[in-house]
Image (tube, grey):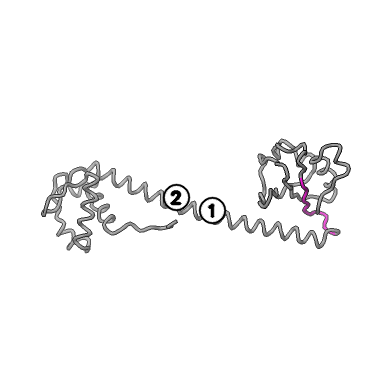
Amino acid sequence: MRNNPTPPVYSRVALDIATKIARGEMKEGQKISGRSLTSSEYGVSPETVRRAFRLLSEMEILDIQKNSGAVVLSKKQAMAYIQKFESKKDMVLLRKKLSELLNERNRLNDQILESINEIININERFRTSDPLRSYEYAIPENSPIIGKTIADSKFWQNTGATIVALRRGDDIILSPGPYAVFMPNDSVIVSGEIDISDRIINLINPPQESASSGGQG
């Protein structure tokens, strides 16, 4: 994606002529000499002016006269051309902004994932001394929370644990919102005090299996 494309010279010449027509500096019916524009105003080649005239002719702003320049046809069409040009420029700027935001989001996601990995690594080294740490639990295929959103499962109310991420296959969903849905074979990564384990096991496992299942720290 080109972030800041510059319009070709003939397009800028066409826009400037259309602007003068829209402002009334060039009147409908007025004859415009391509030769005078080439030498005195824009300092461009005759071919560049001819291309600008052809563009304005296609937009029904000018009527090209053979071997004698062009005649101004429509102030209204000139105004419409300017609006179209500005809309296109706005779209380019919006696409550039979107690209920048997506890049920033990806950068932040990388930082969040790096922080989660650091937390997990630290927890592995100091698992006996950290009162507030992260845990990961595999959600069974027959879990009663499968198909429920985080909000519907009342995960925090039932466990006191904060969901840091969901692991789904090779993907990690960082900071899932309340409407994220638990799927079979998901793993939930949570943060909380050491006594949350039993409450999470009771929530994610069917009642008959809760007593014999555990989580990974």
Q: Nearer the viewer, residue 82 or 181?
A: 181
In this view of the protein, which residue sits in the foreground, 44 or 171? 171
**Residue 100 placement, left or right of 81:** right
SS type, badge 2: helix
Identify the main secondary structure in magenta.
strand
Q: Residues under labels 1 and 2: Cα distance? A: 12 Å
Q: Quadrant of the N terminus?
A: bottom left
Label 1: which secondary element: helix
The amino acid type of the residue labelled 2 equals Leu
Residue pointed to by mark 1? 102
Residue identified by numbered label 2: 94
**How busy is the neighbourhood of tag 1: few (under 14 within 10 Å), some, or many (20 plus)?**
few
Q: Viewed as shown, does residue 110 lie left or right of 88?
A: right
Q: Which residues are magenta?
A: 129-138
What residue is shown at x 79% (from left), y 54% (from top)?
Answer: 133
Residue at the right extreme, as displayed: 211
Label 2 Cα crowd, 10 Å radius (few <14 / some 14-19 / many 20+): few
User: Residue 217: x and y, percent?
Assistant: 81, 54
Tell me which amino acid carries mark 1.
Answer: Leu
The one nearer the camera, 61 or 21, is 61
Image mark for residue 31: none
